[in-house]
Image: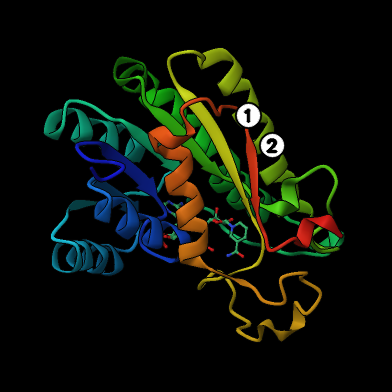
């Protein structure tokens, strides 16, 4: 029996990187995947990959998760087409580094709205469906949001938005138990298009000696949303090759 057989899983940021790898993996494990992102062309590609490579089922919803109207649209589609939701994976995020005197209103809005507020709004919107299905929520934070680790000296906005998401995760886990499990991934450096500088040799201090592949993070996501993690809630799982140990 595949680990997500018959489940409906919604993944934000499914058009690229960790979200795309997770969409493919969840589909391979039997889930019907609702892929959310803004880029229509990349969304169509992911759906095609799933249908062709895994003979799986997926659909794409073009939406900006920072917009209330778009979240309402996603909810409407899920209710109308599936009538249920088993997995909500709040994974969409943006990476911004700025010196303290370069942080303007636009950067603050973009980072906090995408990395923290969108997950909160999606959670509020989908909670009734998840309570009905005894479903699960997974959020993608970052080792940058861990209280014992500093991921980069100019990650003021990014790290604090991810720290907010970690605390939000724990509050949800506490308040939604026993019906809905809520956990958080804290990836370290992962080879995805989020980095415009593709020279990963600058991250030479990682104990495992390399950056992660998106599939390695997706496998951790699969574990946390599957029944194998049935007694895990409120957890923050680093997937970082040991980077946050330093
Ligand atoms: N890569 C790393 O080293 C790393 C480390 C720690 C944590 N993370 C976190 O992992 C998550 C996934 O990142 P990634 O590395 O896979 O990056 P990525 O390849 O750039 O993917 C980011 C995804 O987020 C989506 N997205 C961004 N803003 C959105 C919005 N307003 N509405 C809807 N979708 C939006 C993008 O889709 P569209 O462009 O189609 O909208 C894209 O699918 C992020 O939360 C990131 O912070 C990554």
Q: Which residue is mark 2?
A: 164
| Occupied quadrant, residue 70 | top left
Say whether residue 61 is visible.
Answer: no
Mark 1, residue position: 168
Q: Residues within 10 Å of mark 1 (few under 14, many from 20)?
A: many
- Image vertical order of residue 213 relative to residue 136, above or below: below
Q: Quadrant of residue 123?
A: top left
226 or 122, nearer to the observer: 226
Identify which residue is drawn at 42% across, 57% down.
Answer: 19
Quarter occupied by the N terminus: top left
The x and y percentages for residue 223 are 46, 44
State the residue at coordinates (68%, 44%): 161
Give the quarter of the figure containing the C terminus: bottom right
Q: Which mark is residue 24?
A: none
Helix, strand or loop at label 1? It is: helix
How many labels sit on residues?
A: 2
């Amino acid at each position: 029996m595949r680990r997500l057989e018959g489940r409906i899983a919604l993944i934000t940021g499914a058009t690229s990187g960790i979200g795309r790898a997770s969409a493919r993996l969840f589909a391979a494990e039997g889930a019907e995947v609702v892929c959310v992102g803004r880029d229509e062309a990349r969304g169509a590609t992911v759906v095609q990959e799933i249908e062709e490579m895994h003979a799986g089922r997926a659909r794409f919803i073009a939406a900006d998760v920072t917009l209330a109207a778009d979240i309402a649209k996603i909810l409407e589609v899920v209710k109308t087409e599936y009538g249920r939701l088993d997995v909500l994976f709040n994974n969409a995020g943006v990476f911004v580094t700025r010196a303290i005197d370069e942080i303007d209103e636009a950067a603050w809005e973009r980072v906090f709205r995408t990395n923290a507020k969108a997950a909160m709004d999606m959670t509020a919107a989908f909670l009734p469906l998840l309570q009905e299905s005894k479903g699960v929520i997974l959020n993608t934070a970052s080792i940058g949001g861990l209280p014992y680790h500093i991921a980069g000296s100019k990650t003021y906005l990014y790290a604090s938005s991810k720290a907010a998401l970690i605390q939000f995760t724990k509050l949800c886990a506490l308040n939604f138990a026993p019906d809905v499990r809520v956990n958080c991934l804290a990836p370290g450096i992962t080879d995805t298009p989020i980095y415009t500088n593709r020279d990963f040799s600058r991250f030479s201090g990682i104990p495992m000696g390399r950056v992660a592949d998106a599939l390695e993070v997706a496998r951790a996501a699969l574990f946390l949303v599957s029944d194998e993690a049935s007694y895990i809630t409120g957890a923050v799982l680093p997937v970082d090759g040991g980077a946050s140990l330093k």
